[in-house]
Amino acid sequence: MGLVRTAVLTGLAWAFAAGAVLAHHSFAMFDTEHPIEIAGTVREFRWVAPHTVLVVEVKGQDGTVEHWTLEGGTPSLLRREGMTATSLKPGEEIVVRVNPLRSGAPGGSYQAPQVRFRDGRPVVAPH
Amino acid sequence: MGKTSAVVLALTVMTGRVAAQQPFDQGKYPAFDGQWTRVGPIERYDPTKPYARGQEAPLTPEYQALFDANLAEVARGGIGDDPVYRCIPEGMPRAMNLVFPMEIVITRDTTYLLMENPSNLRRIYTDGRAFPTDESPSWMGYSIGRWIDENGDGRYEVLEVETRNLKNPRTFDSSGLPLHKDAQTVVKERFFLDRTKPDTLYDEITTYDHALTRPWSVTKTMHRESKPVWVETICGENNLHVNIGNQIYMLNDAGELMPIKKDQPPPDLKHFNMPKK
């Protein structure tokens, strides 16, 4: 599937330390050295412990749709970063920088400052 | 029993009760109340040093080899020896890495360290008891504390704590830094406020463990939040990490297993009636 992925953007808004630990446990299954960017539609945003889950529908160039399951910080951590359960709603168009699963399966991790709406607005205002 | 004896007995009983119920003088204790958050990076036993090998843990050769093997597995995309992805508590001393905020409540006989991460409740008994001999081990261990009046002004400044009877598996942090399999860890701590910055709390921790060549001491720094926010955190609510056999997988949004490593084998389904091809 030819996913709509682009090379990792650079810039301050995206400059989060590579390999940064965002969880209370190992996130080694996510490849922080080779992040990718996906663009798609929010299918679901679960405000749950131990990690929030962001599901993004990504349309391939051939029209097929793939669901990406992304783990983020806990509600505890994200709330302190300014995010809430309603920061992302189904149907919204977003672009996310993802540390993908090393297996190649459509899953990965995300960090709140690395999610923005398609029009460029950040989901969480930079601190 | 004569009338006088009965009065004396009654007074003795009453006096004893009164003595046991003396009002708790909060003013004698340091202002540890409020919400405390970690100062420094997440998940480092020594917050002043880099992650993983950068911690320069004084491991024995045997446990250094185990740690190296763990890091090799992590480099392949595995979770390694960090056990808490299963939603078990971090245990001591890792709990004091303070991924989540903590509240301290001092009572006459017990000081409570209430961490937002559930099951990370620490009870520190300060009533003069000895360590029990028949207590089941636990991840947070059995903690006995002693209040210290260091400068003799009639008020306590320091809480010294010793924690024993810990349960495995535990690691120092999420990199898989190991503690010994014998679970004989002893953790000694000193909690005290900064003398000039009352919203800064220190925890000097020394860990004694047979995986170490010497006791390993670090100092944790915590900041008191002026506008605390508490968020319920129930780890078992939606854990996507699944351990089957000796493999760990991740669930997708449909609840299906996904491999986390390249060429990871699927689970063994021999106990299921699979359709014959």
Image (cartoon, rainbow, N blue to C red):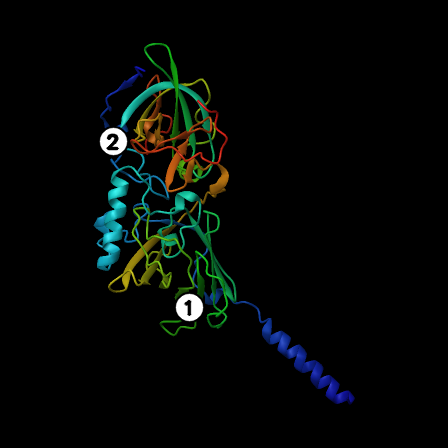
Question: In the image, is B243 to the left or to the right of B60?
Answer: right
Give the camera-side residue of B192 and A47: A47
Could you tell me how far apart the alpha carbons at marks 1 and 2 are, in whole angstroms? 45 Å
Element at badge 2? loop
Give the camera-side residue of B185 and B13: B185
Say which residue label 2 marks.
Answer: A15
The residue under the point 22% across, 25% down is A10
Residue B66 rendering spot, x and y as whole percentages: 26, 52
Say which residue label 1 marks.
Answer: B156
Q: Mark 1 — on which chain does it sit?
A: B
* Amino acid at dot 2: Ala
* Amino acid at dot 1: Tyr
Q: Residue furthest front?
A: B276
Element at badge 1? loop
Q: Is residue B262 above or below residue B153?
A: above
Q: Is residue A76 above or below residue B48?
A: above
Q: Quadrant of residue A105?
A: top left
Q: Is residue B20 above or below residue B63?
A: below
Q: Mark 2 — on which chain does it sit?
A: A
Residue B106 rendering spot, x and y as whole percentages: 49, 61
Question: In the image, is B109 to the left or to the right of A61?
Answer: right
Residue A99 rendering spot, x and y as whole percentages: 30, 30
Give the camera-side residue of B94 and B61: B61
Residue B233 visible in rendering: no
Give the camera-side residue of B130 and B250: B250
